[in-house]
Image (cartoon, helix red, strand yellow):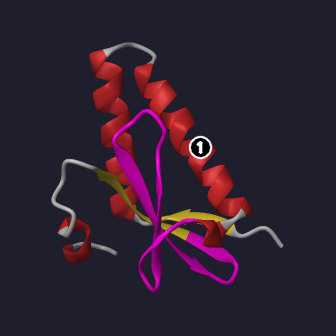
Amino acid sequence: MTPRLRFRPQAQTELREARDWYEARLPGLGLEFARAVDGALAVVVRMPDAFPALRPDVRHVVLRRFPYSILYAYERDDIIVLRVHHHRQAPTRWHRRDA
């Protein structure tokens, strides 16, 4: 069975803000960012255990071309996107929020 992909509200907000920021810098770049996220999540859905664990219940996939990681939890039939984390943010910042 293919896991369902769900987003925490914080992750949805971070994704939207990042996409909008890139789009404001260069028309079409926001779409490229969104495609990079979609591509990474497609691989996560197919192979959720393939990416490094940050702690036992949280893994992350690094986007190509963009300085972001997607942090997620894998729970039986669900992949829960916890954060869309920019690499310039403090590495422990995600610990203090939804993750």
Residue 11 located left or right of residue 76: left
The rendered magenta stretch, by its main secondary structure, is classed as strand
**Residue type for callout 1:** Asp
10 up-or-down from 34: above or below: below
Query: Who is closer to the viewer here, 47 or 94?
Result: 47
Residue 66 is a magenta residue: yes
Which x, y percent locates residue 25? 27, 18
Left or right side of 81 for 2? right
Identify the residue at the far left of this view: 90
Residue drawn where x is 84% and y is 73% of the image: 1
Considering every residue shown, the one lying at the far top of the view is 27
Q: Could you say where residue 56 lies in the image, as x and y percent from the top left?
A: 45, 86
The quadrant in which residue 46 appears is bottom right
Q: Position of residue 33 (x, y in %)?
A: 46, 33
Identify the element where label 1 is drawn.
helix
Residue 55: image quadrant is bottom left
Q: Residues within 10 Å of mark 1 (few under 14, many from 20)?
A: few
Q: Residue at x 27, y 49 (%)?
A: 87
Residue 22 percent across, percent down from the top left: 33, 26
Above or below, comparing residue 65 to residue 59 in the picture? above
User: Which residue shows up at 56% across the image and 34% down it?
Assistant: 35
Farthest-out residue, right: 1
- Give the residue pinned by disc 1: 38
Question: How many numbered discs sit on the rendered protein?
Answer: 1
Instruction: Tell me the residue at 21%/63% (across/down).
Output: 91
Quadrant location of the C terminus in the rendered image: bottom left
Q: Which residues are magenta?
A: 51-79
Is 74 included in the stretch rendered in magenta? yes
